Image (cartoon, rainbow, N blue to C red):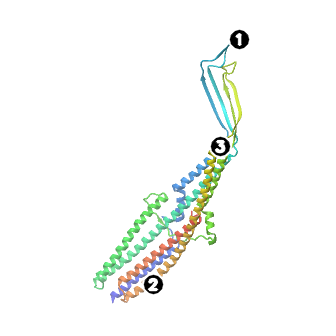
Amino acid sequence: MNNKINRKSFFSALAFMIFLNSIIVGQSLMDKSKPTADSLSLRSMILQVVSTYPSVKIAEEAIRNADSRISLAKTGYNPEVDMTASFANLGPVTKLSIPSFGTFQLYPANNYSASVNLRQLIYDFGRTRQNIELENENKAIGEQTLEQVKQKLALYTVNNFYTLLYLQAAIKIKDEQIAALNEHLQYIEKVMATGSATEYQVLTTKVKISTIESQKVDLMAAQTAQQAALNSLLGNDNAGNPVVRNELTVAPPVVQSDSILSYAYHNRDEVLINEKKVTLAELRYGMTKLQNKPLLSLQASGGAKNGYIPYLNRLTPNYVIGMGLRVPLFDGMKNKYYLSQAQSAITTLSYESEFTKRNISNEVFESEALMFAASKKVSQSELQLKQALKAYSLAETSFNTGVITNLDLLDANTSVSESSLMLLKARIDYAACVYKLKAALGERIY
């Protein structure tokens, strides 16, 4: 009689513990738990990654480089000034003899010259202006590329965050399972000593413990690898073991179904970059057309040199000023084929834009379908957990009346733990799918 009462008390406590743990797991996954001092929030992780990751720095440096190219293009309007100086010794020196007048030297043996030279473009038929516009468009592409890099890194961070969150919670559930089974094993071993249990029940319980411990080892190895990946992503040393917070409340994007694709086309970085690339290709086509236009420029030079008659060795100020006109007449058909290449680039980019839009369309509908499927799985997993808890309650009653064995009760216990883990995974999958859909629509997640 006492043995039966002890058995009832033990399994009632075990059932209550499992029920309480399941409720705690469910609530902590639905709501944001109180963050610990050393846990990482998803928002802080994303901000750190998009501000410090090397690929972001590379994209930012590309923008600074584009600013330099814009400034360089604008220098086409500026004059060029340089200074030249020369010395030359000539020999033999030509002399001219005129009867009654004597002998005259036509130039000195030592010739000195120094001058300041100026060259200024007067009109280039829009070449410089077109080049500046081209470099501005290059910068715009660089800025959009930076946004694209940040968006991809943010989505990658989201995936890392939720993978680690799942592993953390899964290990916690496995610990609870092991603790419950160990308590059960101690009870069975005591009952076995009285002859009320068999060695088969003890061995089966130990096998279950060993199986769950093996699963926990795999989860811990995966957690270690995920923590190392997260440290690398955040730029931290691998000595730390980051812990993430339970953050699973994510609002899905609100977009009308009939405008979901137009919304994505309007916001996705890939589409915006392709549009800017088309503009850039058109500017290059215009630049190519200008290559056979004339160039009008001004040249001026002023300085001093010797060699002027009659004072050959005296340095005398001098200057020269003039205008130059360069008119291309025939370039061997080069410009014609350059234009053909530029037009081909524009056509190719239009095909690439269409290809990109098709991929985006597929990605949007796939992400939307996955999000709805994940939402259904959450509802199903919640129902399954409730059913598993109810089944465990019935199994406990049956065990107390002697209808089933302790092994059947352990199976019901395992079902509760597995249902908790499935609910955890379903909620994590749903949160990850919401972020994936946001990214597919071009909505910023950083």
Residue 335 versus residue 8: which sits nearer the camera?
A: 335
Give the SS element for disc 1: loop
Disc 2 versus disc 3: nearer the observer? 3
**Whole-percent x and y of residue 391?**
43, 84
List the residue tagged with mark 2: 390
* SS for dot 2: helix
Q: Position of residue 292 (x, y in %)?
A: 67, 44
Q: In this rendering, is residue 167 above or below 296?
A: below
Instruction: Provide residue 10's location: percent of width, then percent of height.
Output: 37, 83
Tag 1: amino acid: Phe
> In what quadrant of the picture does the C terminus appear?
bottom right
Q: Residue at x 40, y 85 (%)?
A: 396
Q: Is residue 264 visible?
A: yes
The answer to whether residue 380 is left or right of residue 309 is left
Q: Residues within 10 Å of mark 3 (few under 14, many from 20)?
A: few
Circle number at residue 167:
none
> 245 or 365: nearer the eye?
365
Instruction: Give the mark nearest the N terminus, 2 or 3.
Output: 3
Residue at 37% in and 83% down: 408
| Disc 3 target residue | 75
* 386 or 7, nearer to the observer: 386
Quadrant in the picture for residue 317? top right
Q: Earlier in the sequence, mark 1 or mark 3?
A: 3
Disc 1 designates what residue? 101
Mark 1 and mark 2 in contact? Answer it, CB < 8 Å: no
Residue depicted at x 54% and y 62%? 154
Between marks 1 and 2 in the image, the one whose residue lies nearer the viewer: 1
